[in-house]
Image (cartoon, grey):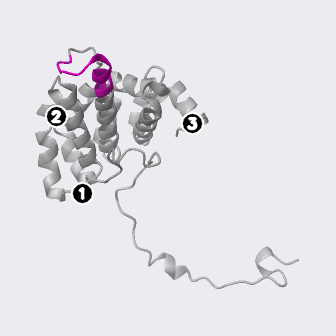
Amino acid sequence: MYGPASAPGMRTRKVSIFKFFSKKPKSDKKNLWEPGGIEEDDEDGSQQQAPAPAEILPQILALISRLKSTDPLELSRSSAEIVALTNRTTAKEDAVIGKSEIMQALVHVLCKSAGNGASSGLGGAAAVQAWEECRLDSARALANLAAHDADNKLFLAGQPNALAALVAMLRGGGGEKGQAVAARAFFNLVSNRQAAREVSEASGALEALGRAVLTGKM
């Protein structure tokens, strides 16, 4: 009996194993998961020009004080800037950024609510919307910084309030965009065994993650 590759009438081709040794190595920074590209573009659909790597770190560090603002408009602008910058950082830069106060500041914004003493000239509904955008951008930036650095993963996984905020987003608290951002953040976290253990112990996290998988959100 003939095997499938040598059956009469079938064409075969020779393959050299040496081509596998000559393949170029893949980049060390992998995009673990991207939710359909709904996050990175600006509101008008345009893309911001990437700054040089040497310029990114000081720009991000300069935004720490602005993330402590109680004005939702100022927070919205600074959060959006951090997202744009962390979209382009390298794994080494993520590690350096994680050692600054930026992760703590982003967690603080993520866990805020519209009623936490917002001082701005915005009306009630507009202020709430601005706060939600700030929280969504802070989650985006945290997901970016936790994508490739183990210490950043462990820091975020060790913040119960941040995990609770991400669970709420995953359940639909921030709409479809919020679900996509939270799913990406959790996907990045559970790629680390210790961080995954922390996530599994967070209230409601496993149920929300299971539902997200079943509904195609992850």
Whichever of labels 1 and 3 marks the residue nearer the N terminus, that label is 1
The residue indicated by pointer 1 is 49
Expressed as whole percent of the image width and height from the top left, the position of residue 56 reads 17, 51
For residue 96, the mark is none
Label 3 sits on residue: 213
**Quadrant of residue 160 in the image?**
top left
Q: Secondary structure at mark 2?
A: loop
The type of residue carrying mark 3 is Val
> From this viewpoint, is residue 111 visible?
no
Q: Position of residue 164 (x, y in %)?
A: 39, 22
* Residue drawn where x is 46% and y is 45% of the image: 35
Residue 100 visible: yes
How packed mark 2 is, by other alpha carbons closer than 10 Å (few <14, some 14-19, many 20 or more), is few
Residue in the image at 31% along x and 37% along y:
142
Q: Secondary structure at mark 1?
A: loop
Query: Considering depth in this image, is 83 or 28 the residue closer to the camera?
Result: 83
User: Could you tell me if the residues under marks 1 and 2 are in contact, i.e. CB atoms within 8 Å?
Assistant: no
Whether residue 196 is situated above or below residue 116 in the rendered picture: below
Which mark's residue is nearer the viewer, 1 or 3? 1
**Residue beneath disc 2:** 101
Q: Please determine whether, in this image, residue 99 is positioned above or below residue 118.
A: below
Q: Which residues are magenta?
A: 118-131
From what the image shows, is residue 21 above or below residue 197? Answer: below
User: Quadrant of the rendered structure where residue 98 is?
Assistant: top left
Q: Position of residue 139 (x, y in %)?
A: 33, 34
In percent of the image, x 27 and y 43: which residue is there?
83
